[in-house]
Amino acid sequence: MSIELVLIPVGIVVIQAASSLIEKKEGNTYSIQTVMKRQHLLQKAVQQYGCNVSEINENDYLTEVGDIKIFFRQNEKGIFEAIFDESVKKEDAVEFIDNLHTEYKYLIQQETYERLMQQAHEKGLSLESEEIQQDRSILLTFNINQFD
């Protein structure tokens, strides 16, 4: 007997238009709400995107893209928002956040894959096949070892 699992790099659906996610902040800044909650994955996504990350404190991070500084702050709901200077075009900021979301969701997929593989081994399942699909989803087929 075998089972198949599909790990899909689920696109993070944003119901609101991108422009409605932009909020004016004090001074010469604005913020864009993200969907990212896990700080270690945010840091890794930013680094994989090619940026350095400086931790300001437990909930705040600073990154730089060229000469542009982007501040990430975790709100009361545990979700990070990105704060940009008004000199950054809003279209560029939204594109940056969209690209960061893509990195973030693949990191979630990778973390889920690793956890699933570990738990499958612990539960006595053996991997029969693994296929990476065109959409970067992963199809896993496990054999279920039956105990008599």
Image: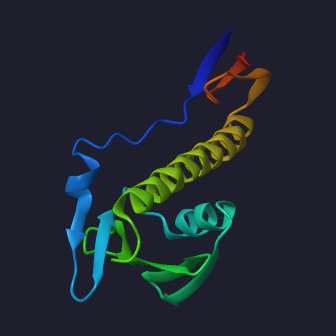
Residue that extends furthest to the top in the rendered view of this protein? 1
Picture quadrant where residue 117 is located = top right
Which residue appears at 42% of the width and 62% of the height? 93
98 w.r.t. 146: above or below: below
* Count of numbered marks: 0
Picture quadrant where residue 30 is located = bottom left
Q: Nearer the viewer, residue 124 or 66?
A: 66
Quadrant that contains the N terminus: top right
**Percent position (x, y) of residue 18?**
28, 50
16 w.r.t. 38: above or below: above
**Percent position (x, y) of residue 21?**
25, 58
Horizontal side, residue 90 vs residue 116: left or right: left
Horizontal side, residue 133 vs residue 31: left or right: right
Quadrant that contains the C terminus: top right
Instruction: Report whether residue 62 is seen.
Output: yes
Which residue appears at 68% of the width and 65% of the height? 50
Horizontal side, residue 58 vs residue 143: left or right: left
Picture quadrant where residue 119 is located = top right
Which residue appears at 58% of the width and 81% of the height? 67
17 w.r.t. 126: above or below: below
**Percent position (x, y) of residue 97?**
45, 58
Q: Nearer the viewer, residue 7 or 127?
A: 7
Q: How is the image coloured?
A: rainbow
**Percent position (x, y) of residue 127?**
78, 25
81 w.r.t. 139: above or below: below
Instruction: Report whether residue 147 is seen.
Output: no
Which residue appears at 52% of the width and 51% of the height? 99
